[in-house]
Image (cartoon, grey):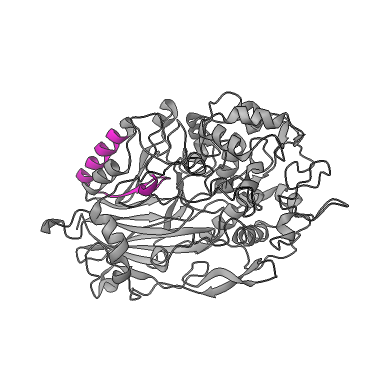
Amino acid sequence: MPMPEISRRHLLRSAGAAALAATAAASGALSSASSAASSAASSAAASASSAVARVVRGTTLAGVIRKGPVANPLGYRTLVAGAGEKHLVRTDLGLAAKKGRGRRRKGLLAFAQLSDIHVVDAQSPLRVEWVDRWDDEDAENGPTGLLASSYRAHEMLAAHIADSMVRRINSIGKGPVTGKPLALAVQTGDNSDNSQRNEIRWNIDVLDGGEVRVDSGDPEKWEGVADLDPDHYDIHYWHPDGAPAGADADRARSRYGFPSVPGLLDAARRPFTAEGLKMPWISAFGNHDGLVQGNFPTSIEGLNAVATGSTKVISPPENVTKLEVLLALKSGKVAEILQKVIAAPGARTVTPDEDRRLLSRAEVVAEHFTTSSKPVGHGFTATNRAQGTAYYTHDRGRVRFVVLDSVNTAGEQNGSLDQAQFAWLKTVLKKAKRDKKYVVVCSHHPSTSMTNNTGGGRVLAADIMEVLLANPVVVAWVNGHTHSNHVWPRLVKANKKKNKGRGFWEINTASHIDWPQQARLVEIADNKDGTLSIFTTMVDHGGPVTPGTDLSDTHALAAWGRELAANDWHERSSSHEGTRQDRNVELIIRNPLG
């Protein structure tokens, strides 16, 4: 059984258990045939022979942005434009890629997937950047590997990265293989970072288009860990404007070779005009959309008061230890530890902001009905709004999107389904078969992260996979959460001859917040030979490869966001790009309706 594929950029991935020397339990049971195929067959099945795609500028068919050579003795890397990548053919489900399919092929649908945008209010008092230092390589007792997602040097640029990606997807407009117009875009969760109302709105407003200002608190200045307040300057954070007079350079510059980018904070706060998606878009609910820091229920007493209040912790006090924080977070006593550090000298007074208030799931859903783009609600229905649920179906031609809410609002970052939703899922899949619809399942969490039984009674990976595999109209499951690119074959047990080639493809896409900051285009085509081809093509956002001194537009700011993400000192050895088999691929599957 495969172990969970979990990104190290998720705060407290196992609620601190690893740091407390607890034994990690294997979970997320999947089909044994599926896991065997995922590891053994994929390399043998992939080849470079595919129908010729249009080499579309902005897709990675034309060129891929890669990490370049080390730019200074401290290991900081600039980025370079590399060669494009053709589609690899994958036949891991046991069906051959038949000759001549390119001539016969009929496009059914093309859409874009955006995942893990993480629009961040980087000035919020509810941010816990101060725990990030305990995952530095020279931290006391070594890094935990659990706290590194609490701070990113570039996080104030997330909305600008999103706008740059929207502009790039708009400019592409069509599937590069089928030429079908992009019918819609799907957000697969973690659209915001901390369940705050302002973050939710910024995300919606970027996708809608129009003026957006990613700023909170004092409208005249930045108030956070990155500014030059001399009384609270802390070398553990990157300060783009340099250092206060007489202060040492921060560790980002002195240890990791980061540059200075004067004016970046003001540029990030400046209003900009978002282009908005030129296609309908729908959205899934992610753990960062529904839980504080992606882990803790928004209903915990005291958290909302911290979010909207006037005290922001910059540096942890000496009398608070790493172990104490991990124990508090593991037990869910996050409000208690926050109150302790807020009362210490490492906190500063900032401008309070009611728009930072935490939202419930029902309130997040309701925000999607205040929109200037289509569809109103962005997939969420009047029933979702009334009942506080976040799962639904959405039809586009012959394809039915079944969008799941995989967030356990009892807490912890991994996913699962409640019993009512599971019963609904079985019903809608049967109906899709009667309606002769191809089904694309969308959720935030992949199957490998459907392991969260907090509160009890949750439906986990094995049961979800069994239901999906029992319904042959399911052709793909599209998701995010890991911040990495993966494509997994999911097979019906192959010991029955009639099941040969049956299953679906699970497509897991990287984030906008961490390197490589990519989205994915998905095209479904009927090969007219009893098979479908599902093409996936990675997209880099529109920021220039090399950032410059001009900070006047979102592409320019997004370029800095990407280069800084590539140099995150906790992520320098990451492989979020995935392998060639996880990026530009043609996935062969039996046509369940052919």
Does residue 345 show up?
yes
Q: Position of residue 375 (x, y in %)?
A: 45, 42
Quadrant of residue 303 within the rendered picture: top right
Q: Position of residue 344 (x, y in %)?
A: 74, 31
| Residue shown at the point (60%, 36%) measured from the top left | 325
Range of magenta residues: 422-449
| Residue shown at the point (29%, 70%) measured from the top left | 45
Quadrant of residue 562 within the rendered picture: bottom right
Left or right side of 133 for 365: left
Q: Quadrant of the C terminus?
A: bottom left
Quadrant of residue 414 within the rendered picture: top left
Q: Position of residue 405 (x, y in %)?
A: 40, 38
Camera-nearest residue between 253 and 259 = 253
Residue 102, placed above or below residue 316: below
Does residue 369 show up?
no
Camera-nearest residue between 9 and 511 = 9
Q: Position of residue 89 (x, y in %)?
A: 32, 70
| Residue shown at the point (48%, 74%) measured from the top left | 84
| Residue shown at the point (83%, 41%) measured from the top left | 231
Camera-nearest residue between 505 and 430 = 505
Residue 518, placed above or below residue 46: above
Q: How many marks?
A: 0
Query: Which residue is situated farthest in the top direction here?
Result: 301
Left or right side of 580 for 552: right
Q: Is residue 446 magenta?
A: yes
Query: Which residue is situated farthest in the left direction here?
Result: 497
Q: Is residue 123 magenta?
A: no
Residue 217, placed above or below residue 166: above
